[in-house]
Image (cartoon, rainbow, N blue to C red):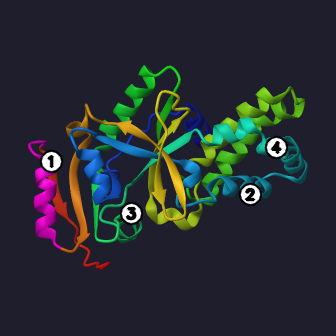
Amino acid sequence: MGLYQNLINGTTPNFNYTVEYLHHYTDLKGINGILQKIKECIWASGIRYLNDSLEFKYVFDKFCGYLNKKDKELFQNVFKDFLDSDEVKKNAESVFVISFSTVNDSLSQWRGYGGETCGFSINFIPNKLRDYVTKLQAESNNVNVRLSKCYYQEAEHKEIICEYWNVNKDKLKKNDGDEVKINAWLDLCKLASCIKHPKFEEEQEWRIIIENPSECRIKHRCRKSYLVPYIEFDISHNVEDLIDSITIGPTIDKKITRSSISSLLGETGITLNETEIPYRNW
């Protein structure tokens, strides 16, 4: 099965020994929300509001580079007006993601997600997280949930996009109405959520991708110049099984930080580590 079919079908990944943990980098407010007994949830953010704001545009631009002239014209003609429709906008707003990295103790991650004075890496056990996501998908009738790797290499992008086009081209040629276009668009959204610009490769990102979370209340948080929609991804019944350890990132006072997080963890059995990076942001 090719990369395209894996992404579309939400094929369960098999982790090998090279993926020891999936690290979720966050700040003090984030770890408090994730680990407090009352909450125990992770925020899944609207994909259109992430740091790489051009993710979707990047995939569409790639189409123009990989397709021949005739296919490129078909693609542009089919989606030219359709991409601005209310139905498409609605679908684009219904994709939420939780980001993880396979890179442990990453300076760029501390800088990007660790906050101004203290950051943390919550180290999830990959196979346990995969099994939990698979269980949620099996129990849900409406919400699509999957754990997926992000792809950065040009060769991978070309394989995924060309396979997508080979599957959908003939259907789009027939022009059988908006339902065909919507289904093709939804598949394209699934690809766009996992295809990233090569310049982001150092993140080595995996994502939990949640589509059409109709049963979840959409909330909003502030982020500088705009509001970010998010939903709460519940891990309250599996915290101790899913999380192996927590790494304390660069902070002003490691001793007091460690003491406060130990108090938060209580008797969970989750261990605490400290970063080896001598980075200061204060």
Amino acid type of the residue that numbered disc 2 sits on in the rendered structure: Asp
Q: Earlier in the sequence, mark 3 or mark 1?
A: 3
Q: Mark 1–mark 2 contact, CB under 8 Å?
A: no
Amino acid type of the residue that numbered disc 3 sits on in the rendered structure: Tyr
Q: Quadrant of the N terminus?
A: top right
Task: Give the total number of marks visible in the rendering.
Answer: 4
Residue 63 in picture, x, y percent from top left: 75, 52
Residue 149 in picture, x, y percent from top left: 48, 47
Amino acid type of the residue that numbered disc 1 sits on in the rendered structure: Leu
Q: Is residue 167 visible from the viewing direction of this image?
A: no
Q: Which residue corresponds to mark 3? A: 113
Determine whether the residue tagged by mark 2 lies in a helix, strand or loop: helix
Q: Earlier in the sequence, mark 2 or mark 3?
A: 2
Determine whether the residue tagged by mark 1 lies in a helix, strand or loop: helix
- C-alpha span from label 2 to label 4: 13 Å
Q: Earlier in the sequence, mark 1 or mark 4?
A: 4
Residue drawn at the location 29% of the way across and 46% of the way down: 34
Q: Earlier in the sequence, mark 3 or mark 4?
A: 4
Determine whether the residue tagged by mark 3 lies in a helix, strand or loop: helix
Neighbours of disc 4 within 10 Å: few (<14), some (14-19), many (20+): some
The circle drawn on residue 265 is 1
Neighbours of disc 3 within 10 Å: few (<14), some (14-19), many (20+): some
Q: Quadrant of the C terminus?
A: bottom left
The circle drawn on residue 79 is 4
Nearer the camera: disc 2 or disc 3: 3
Q: Main secondary structure of the magenta part?
A: helix
- C-alpha span from label 3 to label 4: 35 Å
Amino acid type of the residue that numbered disc 4 sits on in the rendered structure: Phe
Which residues make up the magenta segment?
Answer: 253-268
- C-alpha span from label 1 to label 4: 50 Å
The circle drawn on residue 139 is none
Neighbours of disc 1 within 10 Å: few (<14), some (14-19), many (20+): some
